[in-house]
Image (cartoon, rainbow, N blue to C red):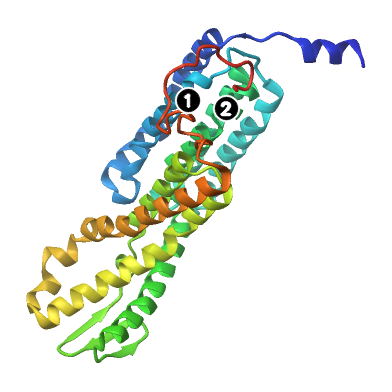
Amino acid sequence: MSDTTRWRRSAPGVPLERPLRWWVLYAVVLTAVFANPLGEYARFAWKTELYSHVFLIPFITLYLIWQRWGERPAQVRGAPVLAVVPAMLGLAALQASRWLGTAGLLSEPCDRLVWPVAAWLCFLWAGILGFLGSGFVRTYLFPLLFLVFVLPMPSMVRDGVEIFLQHASAEAAAGMFWLTGTTLFRDGLVFQLPGLTIMVAQECSGVRSTYVLFIVSWVAGYWFLRSYGLRAALVASVLPLAILRNAFRIVTISLLTIHVDPRIIDSPLHSQGGPIFFALSLVPFLALVWWLRRLDQRRVGPSAAPEGMSASEGRPSGHPPDQPGGIGGR
């Protein structure tokens, strides 16, 4: 083993507080450099329902880190070589923004803003690796990766998800109408019911509530489950739940219009009732979380707590241990 290799392996770290202060200063300067696109994105997200959640993502990340702050490494050593990877991705995002903008392929605000925001995020991750090192990143990997949800959804992805949910919801609604014994004639997305004709529009896809539930499923899996397979199952369950929620909304409003009051189709329940049906979809979702957690406890044992929970108390942990761990946490 060479002397250089021995020195690298035995090189001592430094207390966390000093590089953490330097990273905070770096993050402030970086955000100031990207102030124009970030400010434009903030104004756009404030006015657009699909992206209104992005203001909560940084605070959720900070809370998830605070939960496990007691597991922070006592000493850290920067990893500038590893930091080159996200830094290069950030530069690539900036270059892609220039190329696509010059070609006129960024007509919508979400398409134009996703590249500079992605570059800002990559440079932020590069700073974390450069100042705080890989041990810190390993300890708080999920909260740091969770920041990816601040990115705007490209229009191509948004439209693809909307169209898929639109057609899948129509199929599920047809099945629910059949179960209720309702007479109907269907032509693609158009349903002719007794005294009512409806079309499942792209706006009925519920893409925003589906995206929010998708984000919630990641946090719930991190908090309550240890098995990565069960976490993946929870995240995957969002899609069928979204389709069933949309179909239930279509059938409910249609049947109420036919059998209760014909004005319901033009009422706020139709145009603004999304939050109500989203809340109803949380009932099977929370039941699934409860069932998966019980299954998880039987597989790994009740004493093994999820990452976001204290092993001794089974609740979110935010208090430092008596003896903090070394580099990389406990």
- Local packing at callout 2 (Cα closer than 10 Å; few below 14, some 14-19, many 20+) is many
Q: Residue at x 11, y 72 (%)?
A: 264
Percent from the top left, x then y, of residue 111? 45, 49
Q: Image point 31% across, 86% down: which residue? A: 178
Label located before the other in sequence (1 or 2): 1
Q: Which residue appears at 42% of the width and 29% of the height? A: 313
Q: Residue at x 50, y 16 (%)?
A: 321
Q: Position of residue 200 (x, y in %)?
A: 30, 75
Point out the image quarter for the N terminus.
top right
**Residue 49 point in image, percent of width and height:** 29, 50
**Nearest to the observer: residue 181 or residue 62:** 181
| Left or right: 91, with 60 as reference point | right
Examine the image and state in which quarter residue 137 appears. top right
Judged from this view, the residue extending furthest toward the right is 1
Q: Is residue 28 above or below residue 43?
A: above
Q: Amino acid at mark 1?
A: Arg
Q: Which residue is mark 1?
A: 68
Q: Write down the quadrant of residue 169 in the picture.
A: bottom left
The correct choice, above or below, for 261 with respect to 9 in the image is below
Judging by the rendered image, the residue that carries numbered circle 2 is 139
Taking 265 as reference, is 84 left or right?
right
Whole-number angstrom distance, CA of label 1 to CA of label 2: 8 Å
Camera-nearest residue between 70 and 112: 70
Q: Amino acid at mark 2?
A: Thr
- Position of the C terminus, as image quadrant, is top right
Q: Is residue 85 left or right of residue 169?
A: right
The spot of residue 190 in percent (x, y) is 30, 83
Q: Secondary structure at mark 1?
A: loop
Q: Secondary structure at mark 2?
A: helix
Q: Are marks 1 and 2 in contact (CB under 8 Å)?
A: yes
Task: Using a 10 Å C-alpha cutoff, classify the residue at mark 1 as few (fewer than 14 neighbours), some (14 to 19) or many (20 or more).
Answer: many
